Amino acid sequence: MSRLNLINLFCVFLFAFANTSYAEDLLTFSLSKVYPYHEEYDGDFKQIDSDEANGIAYQDFYVFYASSTHVYRDQHSFNNRSKVINIAALEFPSGIKCDHVGDIDITNDEVLVPVDHCADGVARLVVLSKNLTYKRSARIPMLDNSFPWIAFNPLDKSRFYSVCCNTKQMKTFPIQFRDNAILGRSRDIVFKHHPTDEVNHFWTQGGSFSKNGLFFRVVDDAKDYHSEFTGIWVYEIDKLTSSQPTASRVGFINIQYDPDRWAPHCVFSQCVRYEELEGIDTNASTNFYSYGDIHVLMLINEIDRDNISIYHYLSGDYDHDGVKDTLDNCIWLANSNQFDGDNDGIGAACDPNDIEIAGSNHEIKMF
């Protein structure tokens, strides 16, 4: 091979690398398990088709699973579906109904259910107990009847997060409200790196925060086969308490699949999409049924079958302090004791407001 060809090859490599990664992509993740794998669920209440599956959230020994109209509570093994609520059957004031559920999330006490396609053109948040009984709901006109997912940030317990219309901002809204309230946004979080910078035809399918405030966003490409941009974009939010926080991409999990192949003889509208990514949850539970720290829902539309698979990923440990990145209260500096003097969820090693001293075993190392 000539020197010129080698130079050209090297330039092509650099171009490809520059277009598939960011300098900020420091965090690493590994696939732990795919469970369940290509499963079709026939529950006691209704069949859950992958055509309808939208959301997932884990807590303790339960998995909360959302179709386009229902929310279910099941065991992690998906063999004991004990609770269900039909969101499409709920009647809001003036007899208004909504017929689509997005990707759900869960706090310590409540299940947060985003609903849209509402008859009056206004998206709603429905709050349920963990037994899936109705507690309250609110209208959110700003979302323009599009509420694809909801995310609860453990470091910001007064708000919930979502997006609308593929803008480059993530919107926040108050999480405490009276029944039938109308919610306006609290503030916007600007994405420094956004899927529209790379992909012109992606879907906003899911979002979730880890315990330490990392944000995981599902990027589902609606066209390209085995896209280098599809999967999970991982963000760190800077200056969360400021008037306009920003989100920088610090990690990426590439999930490649075929979104643009027709599934023959299939009658559902989504069958033009053979595979698609949907909801996501970040839960680093240590119980037996937890196969990882990040859980993302993949749908496979096949002939006479509508299968789901859940991809489970393990997070790495960037600073090598023995605490995985989805739990570490100071990701970039080693602090194995996780000391947090002011109990704000940010370790003293990273918190300029935390003036207390961790003690003689406090460890600080830069990587």
Image (cartoon, helix red, strand yellow):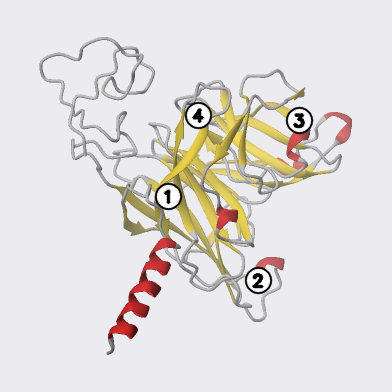
Question: Rounded to the nearest whole Å, what is the CA distance between mark 4 and mark 1?
Answer: 17 Å
| Figure check: 140 above or below 279 | above
Q: Which residue is mark 1?
A: 295
Q: Amino acid at mark 1?
A: His
Check disc 2 and report its element: helix, strand or loop.
Answer: helix
Which of the 4 image quarters holds residue 355?
A: top left
Label 2 environment density (alpha carbons within 10 Å; few <14, some 14–19, many ≥20)? many
Question: Rounded to the nearest whole Å, what is the CA distance between mark 3 and mark 2?
Answer: 31 Å
Q: Are marks 3 and 2 in contact (CB under 8 Å)?
A: no
Q: Which residue is mark 4?
A: 107
Q: Could you say which disc has been placed on residue 34 in the image?
A: none
Residue sitting farthest toward the right: 94
Q: Could you say which disc has been placed on residue 271 in the image?
A: 2
Question: Rounded to the nearest whole Å, what is the CA distance between mark 3 and mark 4?
Answer: 20 Å
Q: Position of residue 85 (x, y in %)?
A: 64, 40
Residue 93 in sight: yes
The residue that appears at 75% across and 34% down in the rendered structure is: 142
